[in-house]
Image (cartoon, coloured by chain):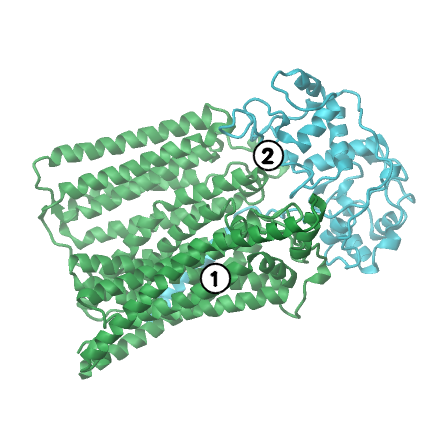
Chain colours: A cyan, B green
Amino acid sequence: MKTFLRVVIFSLAVIFFYTFYASSMIPQIRPAPPPVEAKLDLGAMTMEQFINLGDTIFHGKGTCELCHNPVGGRAPLLDQVGKRAEERLKDPRYKGKAKTGEEYIRESMKEPSAFVVAGFGVKGTNDTQSPMPVVTSGAIGLKDFEVDAVIAYFQQKAGVSVTVQLPKEAPKQEAAAPAAVPAKSPEDVVAKYGCGVCHKIAGQAGPIGPDLTKIGAKKNKDYLRRAILDPNADIAKECPTGPCVPGIMPQDFGAKMTAGELEMLVNYLAKSK
Amino acid sequence: MKLSSVVFKGAPLLKKKFITALCLLAFLFTPLFLESIKLLPMKAGAAYASEQTAQAEKPSGPEAKSEAKKEEHPPAPKLTEKDYPQVKYINGRIMAWLVAQLHLWFAAFVLAVPILVFIVEAIGMATKDKRYDKMAYEFIKVSLTAYSITAVFGGLLLFTLVIFYPDFMKYMAGIFSPTILAYAFLFFAESACLYIYYYGWHAMETGFGKWMHLTIGWVLNVVGTVLMFFANAWVGFMMSPHGVDAAGVFEGNIWHAIHTHLWNPLNLHRTVANVAYGGSVVGAYAAYKFLSSKTSEERAHYDWMGYTANFIAVSALLPLPFAGYWLIAEIYAYSQQMGITLMGGVFAWLFIIQAVLIGALFLSVNYYLWCGMERSKGADRYTKYIKYIAFVIVACFLVWFTPHTLILTPGELKALGGPYHKYLGPLGIMPAKNTAVNIMLIFTFLSFLLYRRCNKVATVSWAPIGNAMQIAIFVAAIINIATLGIYYGYFTNTVYKVASSVPQVMSTLTVIIACLIIDVFMFKGAKEVAPLQWGKMPDRSQYALFLLAVSFTWLMGLMGFIRSAIRQHWHVYTVFRDNSPDAFTPTIGYATRIVSIGVVIFMAIVIFIFWLAHISGKKSVSKEASH
C-alpha cells in the first residue's frame, strides 16, 4: 500500500507540475474569437473608412500579417506594394493578365502564383508557385469588397492615389448570422456586434474609433450606456485618425441588442481600467 | 503444472484440432484483410466509374452534373448555434474532448502492446530464452482489459458525437460510410485475433504451433494498424480535406477522401508514437511490480522487464521527433496559414511546453540508463563521463525550450529593447532547436552505448580502431550538426532556415546506425568483466519510468489538443464551419487543465487494469501451486 501511495503521489505531483507550469508560467493568450460577419453600411462609407476597413482586414480577418511581416521574412513586405505594383507588371517573369497596379494587387490576392517575388516561391518550383492561399476562398474567405478595401489600404500606405472604387451597395449577407442567439459573455457581445472593427477592445484593435481598453477609468456606466444607445449624444474628442466624426457609429444598437447584452457590455467597459 | 495442461488436460487430440482450426482461421482472415485493403479504393473507384456512366447517360452539361452530385452528396451544412443540441450540466465539447482523448490513449496502448509482444515473442523464439515468452505473455494479459476499455470509450465517443454534433456526424458518414463499415469489420477481426492470440498462447507453445502463434500475432498487428489508419483518414480529412469541393460537396471517390495530404504523416507519427507510448506504460507497470516485489527473483524479473520495455520505448522515441517534423512540414506544405498559426501564432507557446515535456522524457530515459549501470561493477570505468553527458543534455534542453518571440508588456518590451532577448533570442529559432534536439539524441545514444558495454570488454584485435572510429563518427556528426545549424540559422534567408533539418537528421541516424554496427561486431564474444545483476537497481530509478509514462501521456494529450485545435473554428478545415457556442480556441491554461483531468482519469483506469492483472496473476500462481 505504501508503494502504491508513493507512486500515486509522485504521478499526481508530475501532473500538477505540468499543469501549474502551463497555466501560470506561460503567457495566457486569449485567441481571437471566431470571426463574425460585421454588418457594414457599405453604401454610406467614405474612402477613409474604407481604407481603415482594409487596414483592419489586413491585420485581422485576412491573416495577411502572419507572413507579410518584418520578423519572419516568409513573404515580401507590402508597405510599398501600392507603388511597386506597376513595376511588377514590367517584370519579364510576369505572366498574369493585370494591366494596372490595382489589378495586379487584386490578381496576386486571388491568384497568388500569377507572379511570385524571387525567393518567396514554394521550394523546388523555381519561384513559379506561391505558398500563399487564395484569399477569397478557404479559411480566409474575403469578399470582393474586402479585397478592394485591402487594395485601397495598400495604395494609401504607399502614398499613391487610391484608384479603387467605393462599394455602392451592401453585398447579400449569408444566412449564418447568429444574431438571434443572445451573447453569453462581453467578448461575445463585442464579437457579435463587430465593435472591434472600429474600436480597440477585447483583444481587437479597430483603428477608427476611440480606444476602449481603459474607458472605465474615465467614464461611468450612464455615459457608456448612452454612448452605445445614442452615439451622437457625446462625441469623443480624439480618435486614432484625428478628431472623432459624428454619425460613423451605428445608431441602431438599442434596437439590436438585448437588455442583457447591453448591460453586460456596459459593465465590461466600466471595469476596463 | 503448466497452464496449457490445465486447459487441455489429457486432450492432445483436442489441442491438435484447436491448432488446425486456428490455422484455417488465420489463413481465412489474411486474404480478407488484404482484399479489403486492396479493394477499398478500387471499390470506390468502381462506384465512381458507375456514377460517371450514369451521369453520362443523363442530359449532359457541367451544371446538370453538379446538381446531380449535390443531390447525392450535399454541401457541408452552414450551421447556427441552434443546430448543436445542448444537454443540461454537460458541455458537449469538453465531453467529446475527454472521451476522444481517453479512447486515443487506450487505443494507442492496445495497438502498441501487441507490437511489443510480437517483437518480444520473436526474440524469445530466436534466442530460445523462456524469459521473453513469459514477459510477452504478461504484456498481452495487461492489454486485454485495456482492449475492452478502449472499445467502451470508442462507443462512448460515438454516442457523444451523435448527441452533440449530429450534423457533423451526418456529413462525415455521408462521405466515409464505406470506411466505417470496414472499420467495424476490422474491429471484430482484431478482437478475434487478440482472443486467439491470448487464449491460445499456451496451446501453441512449441514447434509449428509457435510459428502459428507468431503469425496470428503478426495478423493482429496488421489488422490493428489498418484500423488506426482508417481513424487517421477521418482526422486527416478534417484537417486537410481532399475529394470535396470548396463547398464541401463530396466528389465521389472515397480514396481521395482517405488519402489526404496529412494521412501518411499522421500514420507514421502515430504508429511510432504508439510503440514508444506502449513501451513507457508497460515500463511503468514493471516499475510498480519491481517496487512491490517481495523476493529477489521477482525483483530481477521486473527489473529486466522494465529495462526491456524502456529499451523499446526509447528505440521508438529516438525517431519520433523526425516523424513529428515530417508531419509539421506537411502541415506547412498543405497550408502555410495553418502552419504559421501552429508554430508562430497562438499555439507557439504550446511547443515550449512540449519542449519541457520531451526534455523530461530524455532526462528520465538517461537517468534510468545511468542508474542501470549500477547493475554491473564494470560500469565504474564509465561513470565519470555521466556528468558531462548530463551537462550537454541539460544545455540542449535549455536551448530547445528557449522561446522565440516573447509576449511582453510595453514596460518589459522597453526594458528588453525589443521582443527578443539580446543573447537568448537567437536560440529561439528552429535551426537552433533542431541542433539542440539532434545533439540531445546523440548523447542519449551515447548513454545507451556506455550502458551496453558496462559489463564487458571487447576482445577483438581491432577494438582500439573500432573505438577510434566510433569517436570519430560522433565528433564529425556533432561538428556537422552544429555547422549546419549555425549556417542555415543565421546566414541564410528565412525560407531556407529549415533546410538544415534533413542533413542534421541524417547525421544523427548515421551515428546511431554506424556506431551500433561497429559495437555489435566489436563486442561479439566479448569478455564479461562483471555480470549484470538484474534487480540490483535503486528504487529511485523506477520513478524515472513513472515519469516517462506520465510525461508521455500528458504530452500525447497536449499534442492531441494542438492537432485538433489548429483547425480553429472549422469542423472540416475551410469547408465546414463550426458555429457551436464552443467554437472558440481556449487559452493554454484552460486546455492543459482539461488534459490533466484526462490524464488523471486515464491513470486511475490504468491502475485498475494493473490491479486486475495482479489479482489474476495471484490466482494463476495459487492454481499452479495447488497442482
Label 2 crowd bin: few (<14), some (14–19), many (20+), radius 10 Å: some
Distance between the alpha carbons at the discs numbered 1 and 2: 56 Å
Q: Residue furthest front?
A: B57
The residue located at (18%, 39%) in the rendering is B518
Q: Residue furthest right?
A: A233
Residue that label 1 marks: B182
Circle nearer the N terminus (1, 2): 1
Instruction: Give the residue type at disc 2.
Output: Leu
Q: Residue furthest bottom?
A: B626
Q: Quadrant of residue B207?
A: bottom left
Along the line of sight, the residue nearer the viewer: B351 or B382: B351
Along the line of sight, the residue nearer the viewer: A258 or B140: B140
From the viewer's perspective, tell me whether residue B117 is left or right of residue B330. left
The residue located at (18%, 41%) in the rendering is B519
Image disc number at residue B96: none
Up/down of B429 relative to B548, above or below: above
Residue that label 2 marks: B413
Count of marks placed on residues = 2
Q: In the image, residue A219 lies at what x, y percent?
A: 82, 47
The residue located at (48%, 62%) in the rendering is B182
Q: Would residue B572 be seen by someone viewing this image from the given angle?
A: no
Q: In the image, residue A193 lies at what x, y percent?
A: 79, 49
Which corner quadrant holds the C terminus of chain B?
bottom left
Q: Quadrant of residue B590?
A: bottom right
Q: In the image, residue B418 lies at what x, y percent?
A: 57, 31
